[in-house]
Image: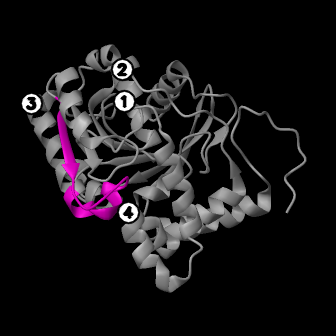
Amino acid sequence: MPENTTRVRRDIGHYVNDELRDRYFATCDALYAKGAPARSETEVETSFGTTHVYRYGPADPAAESRTPVVLIHGSGGCSAQWYPNTLALSAERPVYALDTPGDPGRSIQREPMWQPERAAQWMDEALDALGLDKVHLVGSSYGGWLVINQAHLRPERLTSVTALDPGGLEKVGLRFFVWIFASLFATYAPKAWRPRLAKWLEQPVIVVPELRAMIQASVKAFRIRRPAPLPLSDAELGSIRTPFYLIMGKRSLLVHPKRQLERVPRLIPGARAEIVAATGHGPQIDHPDLVNARMLGFMEDIDSLDPAAARGARGA
């Protein structure tokens, strides 16, 4: 199918055409259905475009005043990637999942925002438009770079940061891109082969039908237009004072887990770092019960240090 002939900027992510976009949205909705039902959806305007936001829980009205969780997904997808996590997290806190402009979600990008200063400005403007003064920020993969970058450049709204097998700690190496392409090709393998390939590649995409369909549809439908982020230097990481939690997969190909297990707590005062066994780049997908419990426990610990600050929405 030919690409849309409408002139588009080369530095702005965009859909190939409306038909493929709508097919992709249908696969996203099937994946969203595996997680908690969104209480509402809204859109907020920033200098870089329109950001689509999903709001979840909490189930207990008394928990509405607790510091909310904000989820930032990885590259090449949307907030549906959080389907294993939204139910547990929103049971105890308000949860907001943002579709990052420039990725294949329901947000609309109008200006480039891959530069660190612009990325931090986008997130700050989005949180401000949502009325969130304090948040527990969680990011995975590319979203991990976004949250680490936020802690470095604009930490004022952040009660804590949790980075799940994140970008931003090391230069993205060839081994990661090889894994990405191998995983994509494996999604088209015969059904009988998929469990073995999923285990070999540490790639849950291959064996979750809805996730596999979404990834395949996104590759056809959307064109990402940004470079891989550069890692933060030791000095930049050392400037972070936001309570920080790093969770990595033991077989991650994006970072060297043992190296970062030593490095991050050494550079960021008080930071926690942990390696999760039997997983690669998606610990929150492969082991959701474990990771959800660890994240909630970390947020509870941080809130207990300053209960008066544990109120994230204006007027809460």
Alpha carbon separation for disc pair 2 and 3: 22 Å
Instruction: Give the residue at mark 1.
Output: 148
Residue drawn 79% across the image and 33% down it: 9
Q: Mark 1 belongs to which amino acid? A: Ile
User: Gap between marks 4 and 3, in whole Å?
Assistant: 37 Å
Residue located beneath label 2 in the image: 152
Asked if labels 1 and 2 touch by Cβ distance under 8 angstroms, the answer is yes
Residue 296: mark? none
* Contact between labelled residues 3 and 2, with CB atoms less than 8 Å apart: no
CA separation, marks 4 and 2?
Answer: 31 Å
In the image, is residue 287 part of the stretch drawn in magenta? Answer: yes
N-term mark: 4 or 2: 2
Q: Nearer the viewer, mark 1 or mark 4?
A: 4
**Is 212 located above or below residue 104 in the figure?**
below
What amino acid is at disc 2? Answer: His
Residue 305: image tag: 3
